[in-house]
Amino acid sequence: GKPAIEPLIKTLEDEDANVREAVARILGEISAGSEAGVRSN
């Protein structure tokens, strides 16, 4: 949820490209889930 987003965004600055890729994917999934929730209401 929302409390997790800020730490994830900060993790995008990690020096490990694999970590950045995983976090970007997670943020994309969170965003897609938010859009689906908005559409269903």
Image: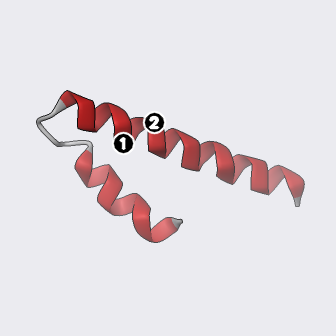
> Please, what secondary structure does the residue beneath circle 2 have?
helix
Q: Position of residue 40 (x, y in %)?
A: 88, 54
Residue 37 has which mark?
none
Question: Mark 1 falls on what kind of element?
Answer: helix
Comparing 32 with 22, the one in front is 22
Q: Seen in the image, is 38 located left or right of residue 9?
A: right
* Residue density around tag 1, few if under 14, some if 14–19, many if 20 or more, within 10 Å: many
Q: Position of residue 11 (x, y in %)?
A: 24, 49
- Looking at the rendered image, the quarter that the C terminus falls into is bottom right
Report the Cα–Cα distance between label 2 and label 1. Answer: 5 Å
Q: Position of residue 18 (x, y in %)?
A: 25, 30
x 42%, y 59%: residue: 5
Q: Are marks 2 and 1 in contact (CB under 8 Å)?
A: yes
For disc 2, the marked residue is: 25
Instruction: Identify whether 41 is placed above or below 16.
Output: below
Q: Which of the labelled discs sits on residue 23, or is there none?
A: 1
